[in-house]
Amino acid sequence: MKGVTIITKGKNTRDMLHNQLNDLIGDRVRVSSYYIDGNIKHNIKDDLIILSSKEISKEALKYYDSSCRTIIARRSINYNEVDKIFDIRPGTDVLFVNDLKSSTFEAISLLKALGINHINYFPYYPGIESFPKLKVAVTPGERELVPEFVEDIIDIKTRYIDITTLVEVFEHLELLDEKANILSARYIKNIIDSLQKIRRMAALNDKMKNQLQTIINTVYDGIVAIDEKSNISVFNPIAEDIFNISQDKIIGRNLRDKSIEGGLASLLKPDGTEAEGLVKINEKYVVISSSVIKEKEAIGGIVYTLKDVTEIQRLEEELRRKLRSQKNQAKYTFADIVGKSTAIINTKKLAQKIADSNSPILIQGESGTGKEFFAQAIHNASMRKMGPFVAVNFAALPESLLDSELFGYEEGAFTGAKKGGMPGLFEQAHGGTIFLDEIADSPLSFQIRLLRVLQEKQVRRIGGSKVIPIDVRVISATNKDLRKLIGDNTFRQDLYFRLNVLPLKIPSLRERSDDIIALAEAFYDEYFKGRPKLKPEEYFCKVKEAFLAYSWPGNIRELHNIVEYLSNICPDTSPDLNVLPEEISCRCEHGNSKELQEESETIIAVLKEIEQANRKGEPIGRRSLSIKTGLSEGKIRRIINEIRRKGLIKVNIGVKGIYISSEGIKLINGKRELKGNEKG
């Protein structure tokens, strides 16, 4: 078997060339290899000696028999690795590092001949005296020779023996006829592999380009991009709309060209700084942001994003709608407010009138009268009904949290602040209504800041510098006398006048006694989710008089609690007086002597009006009695039902009205007493 020996300068080159030849002819020829810097021996003798370069020929001569046939290999670039060089930014200065001076310059020449000349090559090899200290180096497999100061090494692997040398080797070994097809196939295969790799990269590049183009053309922002020479490379449809300039007329032109329409050069400054600002373009307000494209440490271009302020507002409204779908919704309407008494009907009518206004409303009423019900109903009847309804209870919030809760805070404003900050309740109520419940409990120091927000219609978050405009309708509520608090210097007079533009007084349950049973029946029906065990009017038949006689200091909230209590105690049967809470049953059975005396006097006054009308032959009814006595129609109705039950009057249907009985005349003449146990 014939033999061939390869001699190289370094080990890396020896390994690469040995593997190349062994792969091609190892089945027919014995392949040996040595490198001068390491395992070389003397008196090497073989059918063919291959030297890796001309530069080592003199040095290698002493190691092999001079009678041996010798070939100096011509070398080619490793095409499978050369694509790495294309990743280097054009114009970059690089060291080209190799083991010998001649092979270094030869490799650089080969690369330039292949058209890979977009970078500047500076040769580096052992023994060179003068060279620049560069951060990037390219080497054909000689990484260990790269200087330490280099930060980025691109290894394109050791150069192969080229095809012309291989033909010469095969011919000398008398293998050309046998191996020519294999050699040409291997050579062509390398070319095909490289072409396929290029094709795959081109396909991937086209795919990425199409994806990027789709993204650029479908985003809601205008996008303009320039390269390092300020030439415009991207101008998407939104940018076309904002600047009113066609993409075809602008792509490729230089941003510094002052002849470009629309003042593009003055608006998009190619100075390499990142900034954000608000400008007016063709009657539109646009926020322009610029971001620098960096390639290594150099500026490779700038991308400008343009946000139409009206689009920002639209997205903000969409976000707010989504937030409202999760929380901050007003549940109740005027249809949910139960009652047919004159007091509540008049209150609802007034509330419906002022719902259309944007002016502040101050709702006053005792605790438990349903102030938030009215606030929600007003919101849902207003033009802001599609906006949020945000409620805040000052009695439930500690003073230390008021500012952060109502006005919000920026990231890092205080220990424990959420990342990204937090919008306050005023911001969350933008476009809708904020309900300030128990406003009388707000601290005096906080009232000053609240007044400023109401006057200026803008907030500044804690720890922030930006002023945020807000559009909210303010509804406040209290169960306290704010004028008295002003006199006590615990409530600001200027804040009171700011809040009390549209006052609304909610009647207590005592003032709308006609609605007590209707409310109780509604709560009973609600408790059983519309499927009660008994009809509501049947359920309360035994306790109706007790409900009407009770003063309900806790108002509707107390009534609701009592109905829920009875529904749990007596779910299947009508409750008796003995199951009622003590304060109601005692009031019904025994009464309070002072209140009983007052009610007895009221009953006698009503009987006297009836007797006087009967004597004059004038008809008298509930409405005329209400006018004459000054009592509400609801209270008159309750009194009439009571004195009719006691036989003190007779009630006729129609125009005849009410007649006093002989027992009634006895009572007003002092010949009969209205006893406590007789009072319902």
Image (cartoon, rainbow, N blue to C red):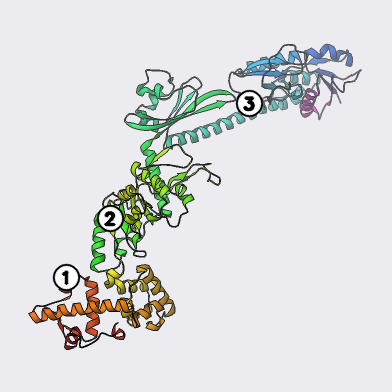
Residue shown at 30% from the left, 76% from the top: 595
* Disc 2, SS: strand
Q: Amino acid at mark 1?
A: Ile
Image vertical order of residue 507 relative to residue 305, above or below? below
* Disc 1, SS: helix
Alpha carbon of mark 2 to alpha carbon of mark 1: how far? 26 Å
Alpha carbon of mark 2 to alpha carbon of mark 3: how far? 80 Å
* First-in-chain label (2 vs 1): 2
The nearer-to-camera label among 2 and 3 is 2
Q: Which residue is mark 3?
A: 83
Q: Chief secondary structure of the magenta span? A: helix
Q: Which residue is mark 1?
A: 627
* Disc 3, SS: helix
For mark 3, does the 10 Å Cα neighbourhood hold few (<14), some (14 to 19), or many (20 or more) residues? some
Do the numbered discs 3 and 1 sit on residues whose CB atoms are within 8 Å? no
Q: Which residue is mark 2?
A: 503
